[in-house]
Image: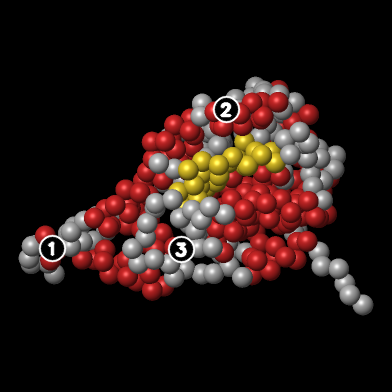
Amino acid sequence: MNVPTRPFNDIRALVGAMPGPDAAALAAVRAREAELAKPVGSLGRLEEIVEWLAAWQGAARPRVEAPLVAIFAGAHGVAANDVSRFPPSATQAMVANFSSGGAAINQICKTFDISLKVFELALERPTGDITREAALDEKACAATMAFGMEALASKPDLLCVGEMGVGATTIAAAIDHALFGGEAEDWVGRGASVDDARLRRKADAVRAAVARHREHLSDPLEVLRRLGGREIAAMAGAILAARLQRVPVLLDGFVVCSAAAVLQALDGRALDHCLAAHVAAESAHAEVLRRLGKTSLVDLGMRLGDGSGAALAVGIVKCAVACHDGMATFAEAGVVGKE
């Protein structure tokens, strides 16, 4: 008898097929680094960034010539519980602002010559309210992950992941609570500057959602479909596709990292091709990064979530590549006496 294939089986197979780092490219970068006209290690994390790029691009001379910020926008049923100071319609308004070039992310992308693409995910149709039902069914969740994989269609050489969606920090907190444990309050923050009453409602919503779905939360993909949202699923798909296509990833803020956390829960190696761009002002983000084993590149108190922190970090990554590629070696600079 033929047993129907479950949609999540395909996702698990892709996770199992993830390539590892390119050891030859990494060795080549380290060899060149040792010959550059400077003390070894004197550029600190800039040197580590170039090694990371080389290992995941599979290139002895890594490049950042086609970086992309992909923003995924979704609508959440949990927003009906008054957990945000903005109405659900604000999601569509912000997406329109991205498209017209009026957001901070547009200015940062222009500054660092980064392409920007916004993916709208059924904004007129919110996911299920996670305090009462699953956000998505398995088929829809897997299909949305596959949609997110299409973010790599333009073949970027560096992917920055961002999001937009009223209620998204509540969703992210629920995912983190399910994956990492603790109390609901440990993962709930102010989001878009909510007042104390809404902060309590957010914690109550997270607590109720995890309690309702508790029997199913041992499977990270069930966490994703039951507590997540379309943009969370799509971001997880994009991060996974980047790994399969050897594209390094810069993770943005709190919500993006909840999508990444699902992948890490599936396989502890799943985020090796990712760097944390920044630590957001959202209170739990630093703890999430600690759980993911990531140290942010910058800490500027940002909390937009639309990829702005990741886009800003592209400037640092480009600088790291420029130093590695353009610096003279000791021999070229005529420096003698190097031991």
Horizontally, residue 98 falls left or right of residue 13, namely left
Local secondary structure at mark 3: helix
Local secondary structure at mark 2: helix
Q: Residue at x 80, y 55 (%)?
A: 139
Up the image or down, 176 lies above or below 280; here it is: below
Q: Residue at x 41, y 72 (%)?
A: 23
Could you tell which of marks 1 and 2 lies nearer the N-terminus? 2
Q: Nearer the viewer, mark 2 or mark 3?
A: 2
Disc 3 residue type (three-letter) = Trp
Up the image or down, 120 lies above or below 200; here it is: below
- Cα gap from disc 3 to disc 1, whole angstroms: 28 Å
Q: Residue furthest right?
A: 1
- Cα gap from disc 1 to disc 2, whole angstroms: 49 Å
Disc 1 residue type (three-letter) = Glu
- Which x, y percent locates residue 335? 9, 62
| Color theme of the render | secondary structure
Q: Nearer the viewer, residue 34 or 3?
A: 3
Q: Residue furthest bottom?
A: 1
Horizontally, residue 68 falls left or right of residue 63, namely right
Question: Looking at the figure, which quarter contains the C terminus?
Answer: bottom left
The residue indicated by pointer 1 is 332
- Which x, y percent locates residue 75? 72, 36
- Which x, y percent locates residue 155? 51, 56
- The part of the image, by quadrant, that contains residue 205 is top right
The residue indicated by pointer 2 is 97
The residue indicated by pointer 3 is 56
Local secondary structure at mark 1: helix
- Cα gap from disc 2 to disc 3, whole angstroms: 33 Å
Q: Within 10 angstroms of label 3, few (less than 14), some, or many (20 or more) residues? A: many
Horizontally, residue 13 falls left or right of residue 42, namely right
Disc 2 residue type (three-letter) = Asn
